[in-house]
Amino acid sequence: MTKKERYIRFIDYFSLHQPNAQTELNYNNPFELLVAVILSAQCTDKRVNLVTPNLFNKFPTPSSLAQADLADVFDCIKSISYPNNKAKHLIGMAQILVTEFKEIIPSDVSLLQKMPGVGRKTANVIASIIYEAPTMAVDTHVFRVSKRLGLSNGKTPLAVENDLTKNIPNDKIRIAHHWLILHGRYICTARNPQCGKCPIQGMCIFFGNRKGDIKLF
């Protein structure tokens, strides 16, 4: 199967079976999504969703978060991974959002990255979900699944991002991000992938090699 054929099969399957895939983070507005995505770094969406209701209740706007005491923010997110750093990032992000962007989440990926805690991956998520931009955020799930399926052999997240955005139609890129994440989260897991349950195992390089007892990851 050629790389082009893999992309066609991948897009055709998920377009039919997961046409409305979306983030599992809970949010009500762009500001809340930005906060949630920053918190989700090296942490599960489930855990983030447990702490954000209280956080958003105490700090519902960029202005309120920008003026928050570090200890108060830390107390709200202490069950999250790296809570001290993330508390600092959240306050710093809110301060720049207020002073430089007038509390409006920018759509430009480079501008988004001016805020603490917002790297390329986070910026791509925000641009994709809020502004429906054809950006591909490459996290560990996207990186792993893309390589296993033979969609990319990139050595870095940026290389994988470039492969995916080059080969997936613009109107499908933003939802393909969720396809790859959800598939990696529930089927193509890092440890003990559920190959027997995978509906696209026929196109998977990892599965084909696994049958021959060759481990790629």
Image: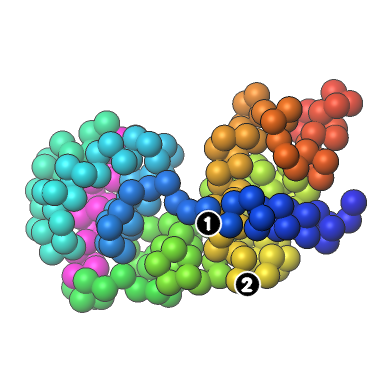
Residue that lies at the very extreme toward the front in this rendered image? 16
Relative horizontal placement of residue 97, taking residue 151 as reference (left or right)? left
Relative horizontal placement of residue 33, taking residue 11 as reference (left or right)? left
Q: Is residue 184 above or below residue 197?
A: below
Q: Amino acid at mark 1?
A: Asn
Q: Amino acid at mark 2?
A: Asn
For the point 18% across and 50% down, which residue is it? 56
For the point 46% across and 59% down, which residue is it? 125
Q: Residue 204's quadrant in the figure?
A: top right
| Secondary structure found at label 1 | loop
Magenta-colored span: 80-98
Which residue corresponds to mark 1?
A: 20
How many tags in the picture? 2
Coloration of the structure image = rainbow
For the point 69% across and 31% down, which residue is it? 197
Q: Is residue 176 above or below residue 78?
A: below
Question: How many residues crowd mark 2 within 10 Å: few (<14), some (14–19), many (20+)?
Answer: few
Residue 170 — which label?
2
Q: State whether the magenta stretch is mostly helix, strand or loop.
A: helix
How far from the left and from the top, in percent, is residue 212? 89, 26
On the question of residue 159 being in view, the answer is no
Instruction: State the residue in front, 25 or 150.
Output: 25
Q: Earlier in the sequence, mark 2 or mark 1?
A: 1
How far from the left and from the top, in percent, is residue 158? 61, 58
> Does 61 lie within the magenta span?
no
On the question of residue 58 being in view, the answer is yes
Instruction: State the residue in front, 118 or 209.
Output: 209
For the point 17% across and 42% down, which residue is it? 54
